[in-house]
Image (tube, rainbow, N blue to C red):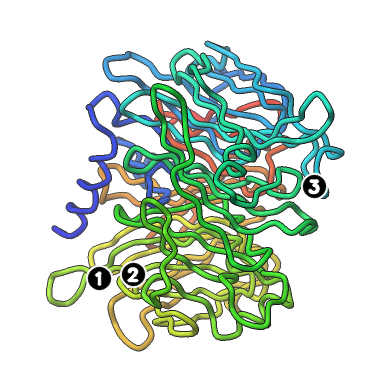
Amino acid sequence: MKWFARIASALLMTLPGTGLAQSVLTYHNTPDRSGLFTVPGLTVATAPKVGIDTKFKAAISGNVYAQPLYWQASGAKTGVLIVATESNIVYGLNPNSGTAIWQRQLAAAAPSSAHGCGNIDPEGVTGTPAIDPATGTLYIAAMTVTASGGGQQLIYALNASTGAVLAHWPLNVQTAMKARAAAFDSTYWGERSALQFFKGKLYVNYAGRWGDCGGYHGTVIEVTPAAKGPTITGSWETRSAGGGIWAQAGLPTDGTGLFATTGNTFSPSTWQDGEAVVRLLPGLARSNSTKDYFTPSNWLSLDNQDLDLGGTGALPFTIPTPTGGTAARVLALGKDGNAYLLNGANLGGIGHPLQVLQISNSVILTEPAIYNAKTDTLIAFTNYNGALSNCSGNNLTMLKITSSTPTPMTVAWCAGINGRGNPIITTSDGVNNPIVWVVGAEGDNQLHAFNALTGKTLFTSGTVMQNVPHFSTLIAANNHFYIAADGTIYGFAIP
């Protein structure tokens, strides 16, 4: 398993200092959005002992879409549980009691009247923030309302330990993009994806809003923080209107490039960046090489049916090869119910995936989690309203991916679950005791655990949570699982 040790070592390099080893700095815990957490002592045998922590009581104001984060500064005895709401209130909570250590009200969230369409009211912080571990800076994208009633997309930088807004922030995205002669209108450009802090730069991506109003473009910006204030140092957008980058995961990275998945464009006669996986390098210069993008050959049909490829983030990973090496892969899950497996070194251009496998009879919108086994890679996602014939109804599905040809993807197992949460995977040491954890969000609203290798049910909480939004993503930190809900955070103690 030397190949796995190299991957784990590379990921740990993103968390300098032993005090940061338990911090959760970004969506799904790692820059590649693996959803993999190491929890010493949490095994297949001890998983049934997880239970609600009745001493943890957190009251917050506002609805929550973003995943919580956990910041433990180097040398600190305890950390801060961070959650941001659609009311543009950011909380730093005591992770043991749930009481507020600090609280920060950003500019007022935007009511529905401040933008052309949408189904979030008010709209404030929707995408998961990100923390720079070197400086302890918390970056947050927030939709806000101006004195005149219009909306503005702002990006804030806060001290993660105190909640203080840093000097020269926030950045007004529309104003900064106008200075670059780039199109951007906060009335129509919506932000619902996780932020990505990568190689000293902040990356934020935009789509539209529910209803697809206005002539928005799928857009990525690169923000460079500096002592004199932030600047936008790069931007990329789809050539056609539409093509929103909707995924909660935002822009996963393989350590070299960033991967954006785009949605439906507004009926261009030729392909113009919609329904695609696009590799972007720092600086965000456009590449026309087929190794840097993929779109299905039926992209126009997907456009016309609103079957976005960009509803879920593209997941980069490596698989072991028979010769002892590794091969780069990227997985995209579409609203058309297909899994698209791509060559990470050459995405393939129009219509050249390694394999396409139908894994659902309905749309796929939940973000996957990944576990690298000895000889293959396992990827878990939740599915609702019908999957394969042997996985009917709402379920958790596990894909198995190997280096074999011509069919490297198969379904390993599936297990029934009522809900639409995003799964994570824990191990006790990075390798052993892999367990899938998922919330039955907007279903049974319970926490569930499954053996990642077999699909056997290990745990069902019994505790029925209230107001847990769909696509809820839990985290493991401070010997707890934390789950954000509208108006509160739930804490489950890990034995």
- Name the amino acid, label 3: Asn
Which x, y percent locates residue 474?
Answer: 52, 40
Q: Are marks 1 and 2 in contact (CB under 8 Å)?
A: yes
Q: Looking at the picture, does residue 18 appear above or below residue 12? A: above
Q: Residue 330 location in percent, x, y?
A: 39, 67
Which residue lies at the image location 27% right of the left edge and 15% below the top edge?
A: 75
Distance of mark 1 from mark 2, alpha carbons?
8 Å
For disc 2, the neighbor class at 10 Å (few under 14, some 14 to 19, many from 20) is: many
Judging by the rendered image, the residue that carries numbered circle 2 is 344
Q: Which residue is mark 1?
A: 327
The answer to which quarter of the image holds residue 63 is top right
Judging depth in this view, the residue of 58 and 82 nearest the camera is: 82
Quadrant location of the C terminus in the rendered image: top left
For the N terminus, the quadrant is: bottom left
Q: Residues within 10 Å of mark 3 (few under 14, many from 20)?
A: few
User: Could one spot residue 459 in this view of the protein?
Assistant: yes
| Mark closer to the observer (1, 2) | 2
The residue indicated by pointer 3 is 119
User: Is residue 485 in view?
Assistant: no
Report, in whole angstroms, how far the alpha carbon at label 2 lies from the one at label 3. Answer: 35 Å
Q: x and y percent of residue 44 in the render?
A: 37, 47
Residue 400: percent from left, percent from top: 39, 71
